[in-house]
Amino acid sequence: MVGCLPVLSRPENAPHFCGAYLFWRPMLRLLAGALIAAATFSQAGSALAGEPVVHTVQPGESLFAIGLQYGVSWLKISRLNRLSSDRIRAGQSLYIPLVGPIAARSAIPAAAPPYNGISYTVRTGDTLGHIAQSMGSSISDLMRLNQLPNGDRIYPGQVLRTTLEDVSLDADAPGARRILISISEQRLSTFAGEKLLRKWPVSTGLKGRETIPGTFSVQNKIPSAYASQWNLQMPNWLGIYWAGTAENGIHALPILSNGERLWGGVLGSRASYGCIVLGVREAEALYNWAEVGTPVTITP
């Protein structure tokens, strides 16, 4: 086993008195040094191959929300940090078990690709997690895009590239407006006549709370609807159909009572309680473009 020192037996012809092993002691020291060096090299190589990111817990954050931000299970974060419960405190440092390109950093960073998106200037009090939530993005996406050298650490005045792209919908495009949602693809498409305007990732209902396929239309528009059962705000609400006593609709990433947004890092996979969840800017664009009565088709 690497790092464990073997026990050398005494030679059969070695005298039985103190000092008889003076010849063997230097040999033991040399062997111990070699094994320790090998273990250190192995550990260093492992760290470089999959170095975890350090996240500083912000006030109001939960382990579950942090996991969503990074796109990893909160259970993996808990195991990596040897937490005895899911309770964490502001200021606590947590290792995040990221995998892929962000964990295998090169000594010489690759040249950044041309950037034509929207930038964000960091303000005092900002954290990468809060910026990611407000942008409908994830911490790992922002770290990759900006090639941040110190994990999630940022500073006021720093200009960050974001994953934001132009999401506007052409209000002057000719043809009848309609919305198509594919549950299997986890995508929402907007059309003017037969012309595809935009196609965005969404999150539909989880197993047991599935989004219902069918042909519907926008029933109502509410700037910010409230889900009393889960104490959630659902911005840019477009009501689609009724499921029992509750209405399901299209809306932006929901907001918890502490101001955190849910599901920012999981768009493109099922996550909701039946609604169709869009990114923040996409939901706003759709809300401004769609009208009451706009047809909505949901396919399996």
Image (cartoon, rainbow, N blue to C red):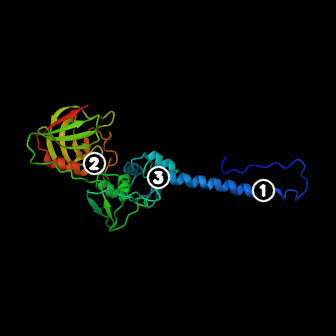
Residue designated by label 2: 254
Task: Look at mark 3 in the image and give the residue it sits on.
Answer: 104
Q: Which element carries disc 1, helix, strand or loop?
A: helix
Q: Quadrant of residue 180?
A: top left
Q: How crowded is the residue under tag 1: few (<14 C-alpha within 10 Å), some, or many (20+)?
A: few
Judged left or right of residue 196, residue 151 is: right
Residue type at mark 2: give it. Answer: Pro
Of tags 2 and 1, the one toward the viewer is 1
In the picture of the structure, the residue carrying the numbered disc 1 is 27
Q: Are marks 2 and 3 in contact (CB under 8 Å)?
A: no
Q: Within 10 angstroms of label 2, few (less than 14), some, or many (20 or more) residues? A: many
Q: Is residue 18 left or right of residue 129?
A: right
Instruction: State the separation of the CA atoms marked 2 and 3.
Output: 33 Å
User: CB atoms at circles 1 and 3 under 8 Å apart?
Assistant: no
Dot 3 crowding, Cα within 10 Å, few <14, some 14–19, many 20+: some
Side (left or right) of 40 relative to 173: right
Q: Residue at horizontal 13%, vertical 48%?
A: 170
Q: Which is more N-terminal, label 3 or label 1?
A: 1
